[in-house]
Image: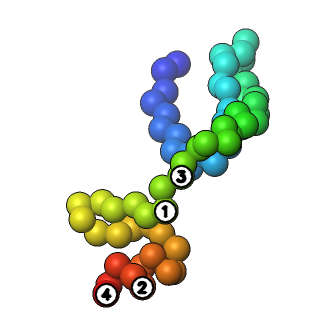
């Protein structure tokens, strides 16, 4: 028997998925440690529109 399946996940953690005898095995592997010089963006723009950022950044963007 063949079936089509669609799975949509909003993953927030790293996992490794491996085929097992009768299905899939999912293992949580944790996150890699951040380097000390890891610069994270403060704002994210999509097509010129601010979609993510702190309240301070949003208030400043409108000025």
| Residue 51, percent from left and from top | 39, 67
Residue nearer the viewer, 51 or 8: 51
| Residue 47, percent from left and from top | 23, 61
Q: How many angstroms separate mark 1 from mark 4 (CA)?
A: 17 Å
- Label 3, on which residue? 40
Q: Are marks 4 and 2 in contact (CB under 8 Å)?
A: yes
Mark 4 closeness class: few <14, some 14–19, many ≥20 residues within 10 Å: few
* Mark identifier at residue 2: none
Mark 3 closeness class: few <14, some 14–19, many ≥20 residues within 10 Å: few
Residue depicted at x 72% and y 15% = 20
Label 2: state its secondary structure.
helix
Residue nearer the viewer, 22 or 59: 59
Q: How many angstroms separate mark 1 from mark 3 (CA)?
A: 6 Å
Q: Are marks 3 and 2 in contact (CB under 8 Å)?
A: no
| Residue 38, percent from left and from top | 59, 44
| Residue 26, percent from left and from top | 72, 29
Residue depicted at x 65% and y 25% = 17
Q: How many angstroms separate mark 4 from mark 2 (CA)?
A: 7 Å
Residue nearer the viewer, 52 or 38: 38
- Label 1, on which residue? 42
Q: Which mark sits nearer the N-terminus, 1 or 2? A: 1
Mark 1 closeness class: few <14, some 14–19, many ≥20 residues within 10 Å: few
- Label 4, on which residue? 63
- Label 2, on which residue? 59
Label 3: state its secondary structure.
loop
Residue depicted at x 48% and y 38% = 6
Label 4: state its secondary structure.
loop
Q: Which mark sits nearer the N-terminus, 1 or 4? A: 1
Is 40 displayed left or right of 45 in the figure?
Answer: right
Q: Which mark sits nearer the N-terminus, 4 or 3? A: 3
Q: How many angstroms separate mark 1 from mark 2 (CA)?
A: 13 Å
């Amino acid at each position: 028997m063949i079936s089509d399946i669609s799975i949509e996940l909003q993953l927030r953690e790293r996992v490794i998925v491996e085929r097992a005898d009768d299905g899939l095995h999912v293992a949580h592997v944790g996150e890699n440690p951040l380097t000390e010089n890891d610069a994270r963006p403060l704002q994210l723009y999509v097509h010129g529109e601010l979609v993510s950022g702190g309240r301070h950044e949003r208030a400043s963007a409108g000025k």
